[in-house]
Amino acid sequence: MSTPATRTPQTDTGEQAPPDSPLTTKEGWRRYVAHETIPPKLLPAAERAALTGRERARVDDRRREYHADLPLVNTPTIRKVISTARLLIQLNRHQVSARRGVILSGASGTGKTTALTQLGRAHELATRKRHPHDRTRLPVCYVTVPPAATPKMLATEFARFFGLSFPPRATHTDIVDAVCATAAHVHVDLVLVDELHNLNLGSRAGAEASDQLKYFAERLPATFAYAGIDIESQGLFAGTRGRQIAGRFVVIPAAPFSYATAADKEAWRGLVGTLESTLHLHEHAPGTLTAMNDYLFHRTGGMIGSLSQLIRGAAVLGIEDGSEAITEELLDLVPIDFAAEQLTTPAKTTGRRRSAA
């Protein structure tokens, strides 16, 4: 049987990623790691008034882009994932097998993917700092589990990240061997696997795909970090396979923020305040959003993803309508996910009663 042709990934940081490169390719991942959100300068009123219509439109366009991509907030979940995983990376460094890993599990919208990718970004930046002149390193591999995944589909996702191509007759074993050889060549030591709930462990193909992940974990000298929706209820820890996974992985829950105690409310207030501090609006008074803590919590259900969308959307609308400030009325106009919208009506009522008082 002929050996499939493979391409060793080009890890030159000067390589430009195509505009459609997803995070699950080395080019898209590199672009994500290198990206930094730079806040635009807020012009004084006199300078702003002196701008031509075209200049003002260009300045406002830049601010809209910035608010649509506000800097990420370092939530407790993100801090926990990064600290735990980086400790495990150290502990696994000289392990021959039975390496420990991390599973991030929770409901949709609780920031699992954000925490997973932030972990990868932090690790890659730290690795680059330690090896500033090693242009062959690609320390992080990021893949997502495709729906109804089979072992070959999963192996192909790893190959796609590295940019490996194969002839039509390539076997599953050919792909796996090429992936492992390439990962070793570029010194991968952290593997991020998202959408783990797509593994249907009740089917033969899903169970075999789970075994494929375990095989990669044995072959690659790397720490594995998984993320998925309510993993515990998906049967991942059931049976012989499940007991082995449970014995090797730390589970970190990703949950919505709570609002039950004074400490919970203070944590939520701090989160809102941090997001508010990143705004670059001409007329927005600091403290306006933190004064709407109740409204924001009940509108979003404590979901970090919904809160981010709500504030980013209101900021963009504030620039477009010229108000340059976020108000409760403007927040009401921002559409968010269906689950959070179920709480919109009581949130509006609560907010308006407070405003009237």
Image (cartoon, grey):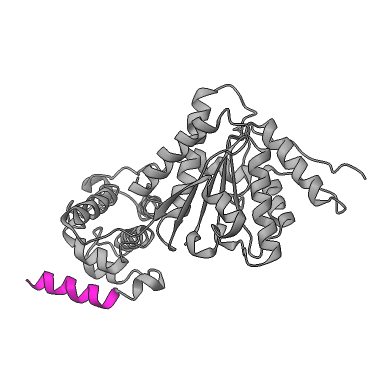
Query: Magenta region, mostly helix, strand or loop?
Result: helix
> How far across and how far down the image is residue 323, in percent?
24, 62
- Location of the N terminus (image quadrant): top right
Q: Is residue 293 left or right of residue 179?
A: left
Q: Is residue 269 left or right of residue 146?
A: left
- Location of the C terminus (image quadrant): bottom left
Is 213 or 20 nearer to us in this picture? 213
Find the magenta span and give its range.
344-357
Is 77 or 319 nearer to us in this picture? 77
Q: Residue 8 colored magenta?
A: no
> How far across and how far down the image is residue 217, in percent?
63, 42
Q: At 19% from the left edge and 76% from the top edge, which residue is drawn? A: 349
User: Dividing the picture into quarters, in which one does residue 139 lie?
Assistant: top right
User: Dividing the picture into quarters, in which one does residue 208 lie?
Assistant: bottom right
> How far across and how far down the image is residue 235, in percent?
55, 63
> How far across and how far down the image is residue 347, in percent?
23, 72
| The residue positioned farthest toward the top in the image shown | 133
Is 175 or 66 nearer to us in this picture? 175
Q: At 38% from the left edge and 44% from the top edge, which residue is drawn? A: 80
Q: Is residue 41 left or right of residue 5?
A: left
Can the viewer see residue 75?
no
Q: Residue 345 colored magenta?
A: yes
Q: At 31% from the left edge and 42% from the top edge, which residue is drawn? A: 41
Can the viewer see residue 214?
yes
Q: At 39% from the left edge and 46% from the top edge, which residue is drawn? A: 78
Is 85 or 5 nearer to us in this picture? 85
| The residue positioned farthest toward the right in the image shown | 1
User: Dividing the picture into quarters, in which one does residue 261 lie?
Assistant: bottom left
Vertically, is 301 above or below 82?
below
